[in-house]
Image: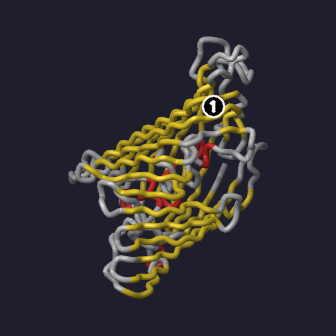
């Protein structure tokens, strides 16, 4: 598979701690001192008083995809994202964002308000991503690859309606997020009404930068752990295994009922022009009373992981997001060039392994399957805010 992507959007560099809110919204900038007026720098902005700012944004991302595979997605040109949005800050303490796709069956993306008067306890409500997974909560503008990892897109929850309290403590070294949501995210649902997904969901995430105050190579080192918990009604599970080209390798045609639990572990380090990221996600869904004798079966198990690395060969600092190339192409330079590599895996089965696996929808030991992908990519940022990505994947 050879995908390429063009993404043009004005967005602030990544915050020091990768969180669902910080990675998505640029409103973590300090309130401007401009009192009244209109400004067009990277994007049009309206200033109303000293502490109120409204930004108008648009994002267009086009993908070119080709593959030698005879199944799954067909090759061709696709405008993957056509989004418009309004975001900003009111009175210096309330952030908001309204973002919508120009087409699609679920056009509304992030629609929320975030009360941020106290750094140790901020409150966010609306529709946004559940606090789970470094890769999933990173804005598509700041991704290292054209596509997110298989673990993030299929096992992480994604967006849903809810409310969340979050904040920074221990002098900014620890960031916590804890929320209650209507369901367990858009990623866990399909258009098939026979597929079931989680109901009311509790989700939380904690990230730690223990050396943030030190001026050393490990200053940016970040660790994180996350979880979700919800109940799933009786039916076929909506969590299924799909390849990067959207071909099915595990249909998950087994009966489930009971609690669904996610656990995620993550680490990120961005020393100088390099970066290393890794995640592990484990999802279990119970099957209470689903055997032919109405007995409990072993839970359905889904696991995903990835390890990725990047190198900005033109020397830009990765922690700054490569937003400002040292030598922009319109100023006699060649922009910022970054090499990227990712190895990842996704597997489905059951927690039990004490018997022969079976394809029966009520078997205790499920006949599972797995998929592994290696991706090599090149990112080319010509000038501020514009990036071209190209990658080759091998499954």
Residue pictured at 54% horizontal, 37% vertical: 230
Identify the secondary structure beneath mark 1: strand
Q: Is residue 105 above or below residue 335?
A: above
Say whether residue 374 is visible: no
Image location (x, y in percent) of residue 346: 59, 35
Q: Is residue 205 above or below residue 52?
A: above
Q: Pick the residue in front: 83 or 237.
A: 237
Say whether residue 117 is visible: yes
Image location (x, y in percent) of residue 42: 46, 77
Q: Most extreme residue toward the right, as rendered? A: 70
Figure coloring: secondary structure
Residue pictured at 39% horizontal, 62% vertical: 115
Q: Quadrant of residue 110?
A: bottom right
Q: Is residue 303 above or below residue 335?
A: above
Labels in figure, total = 1
Q: Most extreme residue toward the top, as rendered? A: 355
Residue pictured at 58% horizontal, 43% vertical: 150
**The C terminus sits in image quarter:** top right
Image location (x, y in percent) of residue 308: 47, 44
Q: Pick the residue in front: 234 or 223.
A: 234
Q: Quadrant of residue 149?
A: top right
Q: Which residue is mark 1?
A: 370
Residue pictured at 67% horizontal, 68% vertical: 102
Q: Most extreme residue toward the left, as rendered? A: 214
Around disc 1, counting alpha carbons within 10 Å, would you say few (fewer than 14), some (14 to 19), or many (20 or more)? some
Along the horizontal axis of the image, is 188 left or right of 195?
left
Q: Pick the residue in front: 345 or 289.
A: 289
Image location (x, y in percent) of residue 217: 27, 49
């Amino acid at each position: 598979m050879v995908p390429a992507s063009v993404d043009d959007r004005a967005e602030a560099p990544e915050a020091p701690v990768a969180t669902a809110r910080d990675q998505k919204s640029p409103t973590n900038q300090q309130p401007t001192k401009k009192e009244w007026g209109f400004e067009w720098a990277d994007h049009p902005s309206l200033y109303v008083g000293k502490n109120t700012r409204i930004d108008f944004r648009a994002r267009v991302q086009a993908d070119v995809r080709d593959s030698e595979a005879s199944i799954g997605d067909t090759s061709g040109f696709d405008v993957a994202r056509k989004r418009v949005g309004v975001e900003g800050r009111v009175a210096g303490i309330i952030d908001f964002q309204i973002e919508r796709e120009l087409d699609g069956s679920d056009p509304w993306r992030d629609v929320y308000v975030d009360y941020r008067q106290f750094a140790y306890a901020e409150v966010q409500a609306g529709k946004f991503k559940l606090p789970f997974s470094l890769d999933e909560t990173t804005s598509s503008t700041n991704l290292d690859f054209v596509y997110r990892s298989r673990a993030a897109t299929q096992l992480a929850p994604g967006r849903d309606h809810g409310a969340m309290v979050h904040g920074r403590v221990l002098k900014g070294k620890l960031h916590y997020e804890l929320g209650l949501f209507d369901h367990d995210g858009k990623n866990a649902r399909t258009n098939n009404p026979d597929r079931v997904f989680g109901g009311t969901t509790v989700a939380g995430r904690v990230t730690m930068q223990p050396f943030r105050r030190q001026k050393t190579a490990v200053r940016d080192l970040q660790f994180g752990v996350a979880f979700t918990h919800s109940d799933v009604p009786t039916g076929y599970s909506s969590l299924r295994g799909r390849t990067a080209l959207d071909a099915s390798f595990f249909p998950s045609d087994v009966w489930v009922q009971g609690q669904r639990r996610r656990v995620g572990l993550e680490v990120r380090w961005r020393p100088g022009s390099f970066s290393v990221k890794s995640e592990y996600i484990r999802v279990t869904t119970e099957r209470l009373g689903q055997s032919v004798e109405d007995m409990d079966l072993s839970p359905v198990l889904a696991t995903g992981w990835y390890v990725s690395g990047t190198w900005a060969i033109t020397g830009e600092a990765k922690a700054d997001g490569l937003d400002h190339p040292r030598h922009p192409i319109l100023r006699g330079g060649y922009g910022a060039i970054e090499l990227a590599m990712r190895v990842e895996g996704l597997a489905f089965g059951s927690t039990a392994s004490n018997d022969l696996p079976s394809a029966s929808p009520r078997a205790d030991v499920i006949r599972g399957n797995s998929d592994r992908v290696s991706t090599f990519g090149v990112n080319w940022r010509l000038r501020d805010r514009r990036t071209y990505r190209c990658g080759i994947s091998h499954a």
